[in-house]
């Protein structure tokens, strides 16, 4: 019996790059789509927030001299490209998908409407939220936290390249220690990098648990939803 009924899965844009330096790697996209459809068949209601860093990052552009708001809007458009790619990959695996964008673009996707999103989930459709919050200066982590609260999700699952939260960067420090469970207060006390502060605070204030896990291990998503101790649970 699955532990969670309704989830938000947060995927970074960089997760779609695979072994490339830029863009969307088709095999990686297909692998994620298969995992998502596998858990969808278990009766779990799935909403997804995808980033755009594989195509464009507003923060980096602003450091190079571009207006930050303009750069962030460009980044939001990048997330729409990723959302449409994810929609197509999931539909090829046999599930029904709706893309909802925080920036209206009626020819290619629906506008974000909370009640409609919930109705899609109740009808067994997967919903992909694109364009972040629709506002500059907010990350897609914040969008994931906000949408999770709005649709009353049970948990935020953040898929990354590492298998949880460590006391140091495990890609740089071989002695880094992984936390299996950690409280919101301890994350703040140890200044650990889980999500950006706005996103993290939203989850903390609304008592919404976060699980950080390695999305590139194919069984991890299913194991988490069956209640197995995978990654790091922040609660």
Image (cartoon, helix red, strand yellow):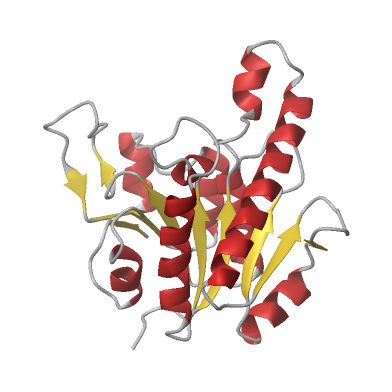
Q: Quadrant of residue 49?
A: bottom right
Task: Pick out the residue farthest to the top.
Answer: 65
Is residue 132 at least partly visible in the picture? no
Q: Position of residue 217 (x, y in %)?
A: 28, 57
Q: Is residue 67 left or right of residue 127?
A: right
Q: Is residue 71 above or below residue 180?
A: above
The foreground one among 5 and 41 is 41
Task: Pick out the residue farthest to the left.
Answer: 175
Q: Is residue 18 above or below residue 59?
A: below
The foreground one among 183 and 66 is 66
Q: Is residue 82 left or right of residue 173?
A: right
Q: Quadrant of residue 226?
A: bottom left
Residue, x 52% and y 39% (percent of image)? 197
Is residue 48 at least partly visible in the picture? yes
Q: Position of residue 232 (x, y in %)?
A: 29, 55
Q: Position of residue 179 (x, y in %)?
A: 22, 49
Residue, x 25% and y 62% (percent of image)? 230
Q: Is residue 25 left or right of residue 216?
A: right
Count of numbered badges drawn on the protein: 0
Placement of the N terminus among the 4 image quadrants: bottom left
Placement of the C terminus among the 4 image quadrants: bottom left
Q: Is residue 115 left or right of residue 200?
A: right
Q: Position of residue 47 (x, y in %)?
A: 58, 67
Residue, x 60% and y 45% (percent of image)? 140
The foreground one among 155 and 31 is 31
């Amino acid at each position: 019996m699955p532990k969670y009924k309704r989830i938000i899965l947060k995927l970074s844009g960089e997760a779609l790059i695979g072994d490339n330096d830029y863009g969307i790697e088709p095999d990686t996209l297909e692998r994620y789509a298969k995992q998502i459809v596998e858990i969808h068949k278990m009766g779990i209601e799935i909403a997804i927030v995808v980033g755009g860093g594989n195509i464009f990052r507003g923060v980096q552009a602003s450091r190079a001299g571009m207006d930050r708001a303009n750069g962030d809007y460009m980044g939001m458009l990048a997330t729409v490209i990723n959302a449409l790619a994810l929609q197509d990959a999931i539909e090829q695996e046999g599930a029904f998908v709706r893309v909802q964008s925080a920036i209206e673009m009626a020819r290619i996707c629906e506008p974000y409407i909370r009640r409609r999103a919930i109705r899609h989930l109740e009808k067994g459709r997967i919903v992909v939220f694109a364009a972040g919050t629709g506002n500059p200066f907010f990350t897609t982590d914040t969008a994931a936290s906000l949408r999770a609260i709005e649709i009353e999700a049970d948990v935020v699952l953040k898929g990354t390249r590492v298998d949880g939260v460590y006391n140091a960067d495990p890609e740089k420090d071989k002695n880094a220690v992984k936390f299996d469970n950690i409280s919101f207060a301890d994350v703040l006390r140890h200044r650990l990098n889980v999500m950006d502060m706005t996103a993290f605070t939203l989850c903390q204030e609304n008592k919404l648990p976060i699980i950080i896990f390695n999305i590139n291990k194919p069984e991890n998503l299913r194991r988490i939803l069956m209640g197995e101790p995978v990654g790091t649970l922040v609660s």
